[in-house]
Each structure stands twice: as structure tokens, then as C-alpha cells.
Image (cartoon, helix red, strand yellow):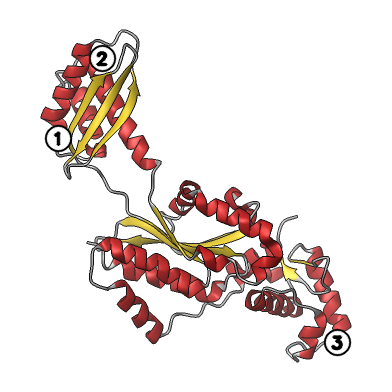
Amino acid sequence: MSTPPVTELSSRAREIFRLVVEGYLASGQPVGSKTLAGEGRVNLSPASIRSVLADLETLGLLAAPHTSAGRLPTESGLRLFVDGMMQVAEPTAHEQAAIQQRLAQPGPIEHALEEASALLSDLSGAAGMVLVPRQDTRIAQLSLVPLGRRQALAVLVGDDGAIENRVLDLPPGTEAAALEQAGNYIGARLAGLTLAEAAQRLTDEISSGRSALDEASRDLVASGLAVWSEDAARRPVLIVRGQARLLDEAALSDLDRVRSLLDDLESKQSVAQLLDTARDAQATRIFIGSENRLFSLSGSSVIASPYRDRAGRVVGVLGVIGPTRLNYARLVPMVDFTARSLGKLIG
């Protein structure tokens, strides 16, 4: 069933729905008609409130747990709330100053990234995450060493002195001379370039006829560059802090969900790939529960925002992850401000 737009709800239904969602986000507990009537925030009898709650449940916006007479928002209801009803609370001047001061502690940028993750955890009471900027390795040397008739060892030496190895499958009949020619070409023409720049130069020289490589050697150079480029893209670095905060009192009644969430966080690559989808976002993104396949079991939410360097280039993503009862109205602007503050520290 599709979720109705906010405009299709009556003013009375909108108000009761908003109160139920806000009550649930504040307490983590279902909200009942007696609570709404008793607080005097709805000028209706408990019977009339129950009727509206039942209508909202029929629309798929609220659900009633078996053990409670109250209602709580469904994932569709939360999505309707954050997209069409939520009023964000911008960080106060004091909060902004505290965030900036904490991020600007002396030390390398890696320290600021770690601090940002811990800061987001403290702000949210959940887990904070920072996807570290991708480091484009610059090639000092890339050698192809034969391991047998069908494999070679690609040895990449970065300009920072780091050395890494990968096994490369070879086409049948590859000669040792082709491996040597490919290595010589890389050293002479591609040293000092990033992997992306090297791949582009190879393409340009082949298309313009300036490459002195034969076809076999060209293929080897392209394969050698590709294995490193693909590997780097699959290995985003994710900093996670505050996992223990996910084990609060409310979580104890749903340990299977929490265990599933902690398993998701343990597999950092999957979470990093989710955060990476927020790189091109123009504003903070919110992922709620099973809207994303990764959290179909844990029913968790993620608030994520890209952060940029001083030139305006997106270099990473940060955010928080926790139960769907996150305080979205407070955390969305907090995450956004933290992203902007971190970006100012990155050259």
C-alpha cells in the first residue's frame, strides 16, 4: 500500500500522527489514546482519538504492537514524518562552537576524522560513522612478475614508499617479454600519476597512436592498472565509534534486532557502500529501516551527509546509525553542521 501524502490527511489526523511519532521518538515506546488525551494536547475524547489512530493504522502509518494498546510509527510513517512534517532544530551557537572546537584539536587530519565519528556518537546516543577520503595512490613503480604460465604478480610501489601485491590472471600465451615491456612503459610514462590519471594517459596514447606498446603489452598495462583501481574502490575506509551505545535499555527487549545491526556494522564494507551513495546528495540523506536492503533485518536508520574539501569537492561521508527512533529533527542539522565543519579542515 502506498503512503498517502501529508496533504491528504485531515488536520486532526496530522496532529495526532505527529504527536504519536514525536512521543515514540522521545521514549521509544508506543503512544496510546489515554496518554494523548491525558496530556491535554488533543482536544478529543480517548474514543475519538482511538478512531483516528485506527484510521492511521489502516493507512499503514502506525502499527500496534501485540503487547501494547498504544501505537508506534511504521517505517512508512517515519518516512512521511521526516519528509513532510518534521521541523528541524538548528544547533545553537554554543553547540556549533563546541563541535568546531572539538574537531579543530591539534593533530593530523586523521585525528579530526576519528574525533568526528566519536562526536557524532555523543550527539546521537547511537554510533557515529565517518567514511574516510579516498587516497589516490601515485605510482612510483608497477612491476609485473611472472608466477607461471597463467598468472603474474602485480607489485605496486606508491610515491609514499608503500608496497602492495596483487595476483593478475594472464591471457594464454603471454610471453615474459610482454610483461617486461609493460613494466618499462609504466616506469617511463606513468610514474608520478594516480591510477586514474595513468589509465587515462594509456587510453589517450593508444587512441592517438603514440603508444609504442604492442597489443599484448597494452592489455597487460590496462589489466595491471585496473586490478588496483577496482581494489581501491572496493576498500573504502570506515571509522565507527559508539557501537556500545546501541545496547541501551530499550534495545534489551529486541536483542535480535540489535545483534543484526552490530553484525551489519562488523561488515564495514557494506555500510561504507551505503554511505557512499550519499556522496552526490545535495542535502543530508536519511535511510529508514528496510528501505535499504542492508537493514532489512535490523530495522535501523542512517542519517548521512557528504563533506567537502575547501575547493568544494566531495571527499567523504559522515553520519550516525541507530534504531529508527533516532531524534531526526535534532540530528539532521547536527550531522549537516558537523560535515561542513569537518570540510573546512580539509585542504
Please say whether residue 298 is visible from this viewpoint.
Answer: yes
Label 2 CA crowd tier, 10 Å (few <14, some 14–19, many 20+): some
Q: Residues within 10 Å of mark 3 (few under 14, many from 20)?
A: some
Which residue is the site of mark 1?
191
Question: Is 247 left, or right, of 183 in this rendering?
Answer: right
Image quarter of the C terminus: bottom left
- Is 299 or 53 nearer to us in this picture? 299
Q: Amino acid at mark 1?
A: Ala
Q: In the depicted view, which residue is nearer to us: 319 or 117?
A: 117
Q: Is residue 18 above or below residue 75?
A: below
Mark 2 secondary-structure assignment: helix
Identity, as a three-letter code, of the amino acid under mark 3: Ser
Q: State the residue position of label 2.
A: 216
Q: Residue at x 45, y 73 (%)?
A: 334
Q: Do residues under tags 2 and 3 come within 8 Å of each other at their CB atoms? A: no
Left or right: 339 in relation to 106:
right
